[in-house]
Amino acid sequence: MKLVIVSGLSGSGKTVALHALEDAGYYCIDNLHLELLPAVVGQLRQAPQAGYSEAAVGIDARSGIESLDQFGRIVNEIRAMGVELQIIFLYAELETLLRRFSETRRRHPLARRGIPLMEAINLERDLLGVIADHADLAIDTTRTNVHQLSQSIRERVRQASLRGLSLLIQSFGFKYGSPVDSDFVFDVRCLPNPHWQPGLAALTGKDPAVIRFLENESMVEAMFNSLRDFLTTWIPRFESDNRSYLTVSIGCTGGRHRSVYLTERLSRHFRELRGDGVSTRHRELS
């Protein structure tokens, strides 16, 4: 049996993630109390013919601090049953969460106790810290829309199940902030910048003119070779450590030229080696 635990801050996209998994064929249960999880998993394992061989469960802070403190023990208990378990944790920046609650006019689950919204978000972050510490995949949804999150969840869970490790290579712009949900962050701002070349500023690293410019720069080729060799060496070490997810982020100033070019090229290289286990994302082009 495969089980995905989806948790995270309210407003970060847990419901979207569960809907994405449901669309992918998973039997989904939302807002399950953590202490009920072993019993529910036991029941699902007894009826695989009913379509319960792949299940996803949403866990949030309403389980309470006493139960959440037992998260590690409960996870070990479930894995001892022979269950293939993946844990996904979603979060977003405070300002983004505040805006989302304002736009939807929904109440925060912990705010029902009379706690102000900002205080409720911070309390929830503390309560769920133990789950975040155990997460196989942490996703920052601050700059991710509903469709992007759904696609990412479906792709990465499927890849981890099929290939053993789901590799995401993404580009970004440092001027918009570094992606904190990365395992590796590489800074390529030292490379020649197409932005300052006539006619290239409005293009991206996917356009032929930008590609030709960067391919003619020896520093770009050296950077690609270094990144390729580094990842070729260390990806197998993560796999041998039973990691399900690995996120590699490549940043330039605006996230449109150099980082996009290298992300595309590295993705092609590792897709040839690993097949469908590689995803590509360009944060600033989304």
Image: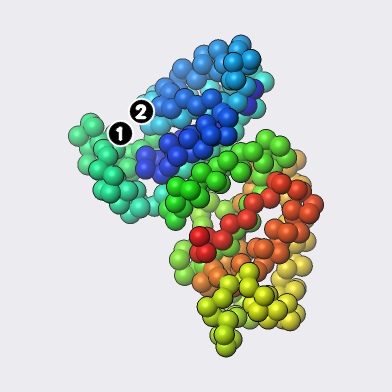
In this rendering, the count of numbered labels is 2
Badge 1 vs badge 2, beta-carbon distance below 8 Å: yes
Q: Position of residue 129 (x, y in %)?
A: 45, 38
Between the C-alphas of marks 1 and 2, the distance is: 7 Å
**Which of these two is toward me, 55 or 182?**
55
Residue 67 image position (x, y, % from top left): 42, 23
Left/right of residue 274 with respect to residue 173 in the rendered view:
right
Locate residue 282: give its quadrant: bottom right
Name the residue type under label 2: Arg
**Is any atom of residue 232 visible in this view?**
yes
Residue 238 in sight from this viewpoint: no
Work out whether 222 lies above or below 46: below
> Residue 209: which quarter of the image?
bottom right
Compared across the picture, whether 214 is left or right of 71 comes to right
Q: What residue would you read off at disc 1?
A: 109
Secondary structure under tag 2 reads: helix
User: What's the residue at 32%, 42% (across, down)?
Assistant: 121
Q: Which mark is residue 62?
A: 2
**Callout 1: SS:** helix
Residue 125 vs residue 10, the one in the foreground: 10
Q: Residues within 10 Å of mark 1 (few under 14, many from 20)?
A: some
Q: Residue, x 47% and y 70% (percent of image)?
A: 175
Disc 1 marks a residue whose amino acid type is Pro
